[in-house]
Image (tube, rainbow, N blue to C red):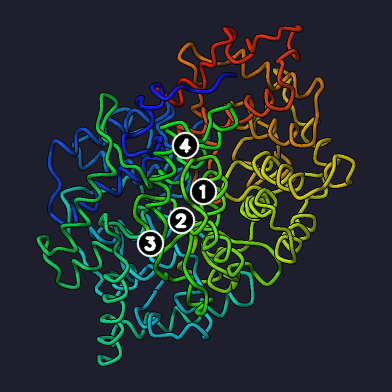
Amino acid sequence: MTAVTTSSLVGRLQDADGWWKGELETNVTMEAEDLLLRQFLGIRTEDQTQRTATWIRSRQRDDGTWATFYGGPSDLSTTIEAYVALRLAGDGVDQPHMAKAARFARESGGLEASRVFTRIWMALFGLWSWEDLPVMPPELMLLPPSIPLNIYDFGCWARQTVAALTVISAHRPVRPIPVTIDELRSGTEPDRRATSRWGKRFEHLDRLLHVYEHKPISVLRKLALQRAERWIVQRQESDGSWGGIQPPWVYSLMALHVQGYPLDHPVMRAGLDGLDSFTIDDEAGRRLEACQSPVWDTALAVIGLADAGTPPSDEGMRRAGDWLLGEEVTIKGDWSIRRPRLDPGGWAFEFANDHYPDIDDTAEVVLALRHCDVVAEGAIDRAVAWIEGMQCRDGGWGAFDADNVRGLCEELPFCDFGELIDPPSADVTAHVVEMFAVLGRPGPVMDRGVQWLLDAQEVDGSWFGRWGANYVYGTGAVVPALAAAGLGPDHPAMAKAVRWLEAHQNPDGGWGEDLRSYRDPSLSGQGTSTASQTAWALLALLAVGQRGPSTDGGLQFLVDTQREDGTWDEPWFTGTGFPGDFYINYHLYRLVFPVMALGRHLGGRGDGRHLGGRGDGRHLGGRGDGRAVRELADG
């Protein structure tokens, strides 16, 4: 593969400022809750509603349901929220697509069996009783970090959401809408009784808190609400978001509104304007990105182009490096609660998220900056020092916090959806280990990370993927990291991982893994082949020097499935937000990871002869012209 020319890098996919960003697709709860938020605030317009309804209907399946990921099982809460949004849009209960959805909801336990967050949304409009919801009092915000169940025990994404919800639940607002949803009720309450010791204790505590809610200590409640309000406002980002993600964003806006903030207050105005910037409105309809990933996408794009032979001096690479340097986080965020003496340094995932830089992005950005002709030594040194200081006691790394492992909050009746804590994960730890190895900075910190990865290997030879689907992602991250750290292909852990990958290759030569493997590990490594997951497997095999039928089959799969425009079709979701609950389709994954794999293959062999003895690079799309790289650069 030849280097990409300077002129081609000024193309459509790279922004003029130097960054890349693919669409981040999730599920229709984003759009449904956007309409419900606007209804609550009194700003929903008919045009927004109809454009959003068009998108929601387009995601409905033939059986009338909605899922949390492409090809996934029907999801009760998602279906209920989508249904209510369509009712706001004027869809009648007797219309076939609505009747199907309602029938599924009733047969699946009804509104009564939906998750807490869905019932909170219904309570906001008088469609569910606040009395029948678990209590999360704002007095929680008064607990110091040393006390269990304080706000910093929650992962950063849950922390910001919970803080806002304590305010909302204290006010218990009800703003009726001209919609009834009795047709979604089953008439039967599910058995939600806890089975664990702590779960039973918290159920008893919840009963006491319900009593307290009817007559809270006024001075304490006022202080708690003031603390929560101040905490929320202090964490609004420059783009108007909270954490750059949808859940705390929408709840924070509602929390501040019930606290008395008018819609024209600067905080509210910035928040609503920011939501508009996360909205995509095209011929497919109006939809909301749950998050945006420019830092992550840019780092991966730079690494992919470098693997494909683009030199650091290329103008596009320089612009990307300059933009990344400008995104360095230089203030202390919530992570400093556990690491108060640690200086800041690193990168977040989004355009604006200074309160929550993450270790995964930071490691990848450091690796990317090595391929850009920019002066980055200072930023890299600060990032490395920050990552070293964020190592957990067990030697691994979480995403946003150090030692965020207190699982007690997961026992709360309120918390029935999504991951709540941020323990070390194999994929994040692997990226950090790879960073240390590539930088040539071995030592005790990296050694502990390596040992953590060896200890975390599954019995079958794979690694669990926290932020990508799933064991293919984990294994595809860990093997290259351990190889960079010096473990050879004969090391037992590496040999075992290769055997696992080879055993889970599909007959078409690719790899895929269904997201249901998070709930059913027997499905690990099984699923329809995708370009991104095939690339992850290839990156692992190439890292240990595997050049044989498995590698050839994976490369051939990429050749056979590449589109004429140089990219790949990938409707399947291969990114993970909350294992088991919330998933992501990163639209750039289908391009950047195959470019990495193909580039590393050529860099390792240099002659492209693994397919039919051709030395002309035609396996990169069958034409020898580097279409995938040109697509990344040009669009």
Q: CA distance from mark 2 to mark 1?
A: 7 Å
Disc 3: which residue: 354
Label ID, residue 586:
4
- Cα separation between marks 2 and 3: 8 Å
Residue tagged 2: 347
* Direction from residue 347 to residue 390 in the image, left or right: right
Q: CA distance from mark 4 to mark 2?
A: 19 Å
Q: Residue at x 19, y 34 (%)?
A: 50
Mark 1, residues whose alpha carbon is within 10 Å: few (<14), some, or many (≥20)?
many
Q: Amino acid at mark 1?
A: Val
Question: Where residue 4 sits in the image (x, y, percent)?
Answer: 49, 23
Q: Residues within 10 Å of mark 2 (few under 14, many from 20)?
A: many
* Disc 2 secondary structure class: loop
Residue 365 - label? 1
The image position of residue 195, as x and y in percent, is 63, 69
Q: Residue at x 19, y 50 (%)?
A: 273
Residue type (three-letter) at the residue carrying disc 2: Trp
Q: Residue flagged by tag 3: what amino acid is it?
A: Asp
Under circle 1, the secondary element is: helix
